[in-house]
Image (tube, rainbow, N blue to C red):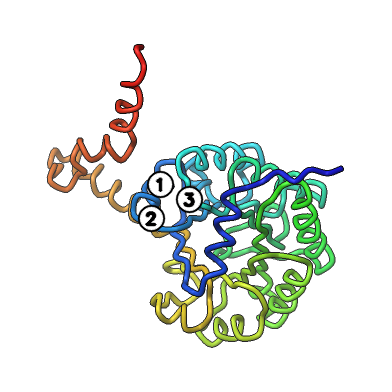
Amino acid sequence: MTTTFPNPRADRLRELLAGDDLLLSPCCYDALSARMIEQAGFEMSFMSGFAASASRIGMPDLGLMSYGEVLDHTRNIAEATRLPFVADGDTGYGNAMNVIRTVKGLGRAGAAAVMIEDQVAPKRCGHTPGKAVVSRDLAYDRIRAAVDARQEQDVLILARTDARHDHGLGEAMERAAMFHELGADIIFVEAPQSEAEMRRICDELPGPQMANMLEGGATPILPHAELRDIGFRIAAYPLTLLSAVMATAVETLAALREDRVETGRLMEFGELRDRIGFNDYYTRADRYES
């Protein structure tokens, strides 16, 4: 008899999706950024493949991170935060059996949901040139396998299609509708190019829809109220936090070379220690003699 491993984070994400408000999901790129998203009061996060690749290996999101690296990254994030979060499972790292292993592994590592997409491997960031998708049959097999993995590991499936880029919105929506029919919990049509396309996605497709708010990307950046009105259930911000941190780092490093760092712009050392967890560590350690 097959045993399904429970997943409290998946249960929590289902509770959030059962509500009627827009879920704001700043994307984390490592354990510290995940911790800060929780400290800021958000209810969920998303481990952005773009940002995680940049943070972990210092390289672009072009399928260069291995399954093992993504699994380890997911585990580190899960240990740093109690928030439910989505892990980016890319194309599943192989055939349908690899997809099953990927979904089970990331769910057991602590992800509330795993995203599986229909790009060819190696995949590319959804807002960069050169991406292409696999055939419908192969795309459907990936989602069918991801759903089958839930028989052994409780986890939500976020099904993504990048077909809008080369094949138009109609093809992307047909794929997305089938993803839902196959059992995907959340649908993500990547890179719609206008507000009208975004409205069509939410009006015509079943199930919860996710919007990807990538500054400088192909999709319009809309206020939260408009995203709610359109009907999206999740708004992911894949690079907002990483971009802010990198911009500040570039500026600070340039200032440091010129011996003009303004300490007033830096986080105070006491707050930095507290946010990282030093104070909590000392409080808990006081219970023990050594």
Q: Closest to the observer: 7 or 238?
A: 7
Q: Nearer the viewer, mark 3 or mark 2?
A: 3
Pointer 1 local density, CA inside 10 Å: few below 14, some 14–19, many at least 20:
many
At label 1, which amino acid type do we have?
A: Ser
Q: Is residue 130 above or below residue 83?
A: below
Q: Earlier in the sequence, mark 3 or mark 1?
A: 1
Furthest-front residue in this view = 287
What residue sits right under mark 2 in the picture?
241
Q: Secondary structure at mark 1?
A: helix
Query: Residue 204: which quarter of the image?
Result: bottom right
The reply, left or right, for residue 145 in relation to residue 198 is right
Q: Which disc, if any, is residue 83?
A: 3
Q: Earlier in the sequence, mark 2 or mark 1?
A: 1
Q: Quadrant of the N terminus?
A: top right
**Are the residues at dot 2 and dot 1 in contact (C-beta closer than 8 Å)?**
yes
* Residue at image location 55% in from the left, 56% down from the top: 12
81 or 32, which is in the foreground? 81
Percent of width and height locating residue 152: 77, 46
Quote the CA–CA distance across marks 2 and 1: 8 Å
Marks 3 and 1 close (CB-CB < 8 Å): no
Q: Check disc 2: other Cα within 10 Å, few if <14, some if 14-19, many if 20+.
A: some
Task: State the residue at coordinates (52%, 68%).
Answer: 234
Q: Which mark is residue 33?
A: 1
Question: Is label 3 or label 1 in front?
Answer: 3
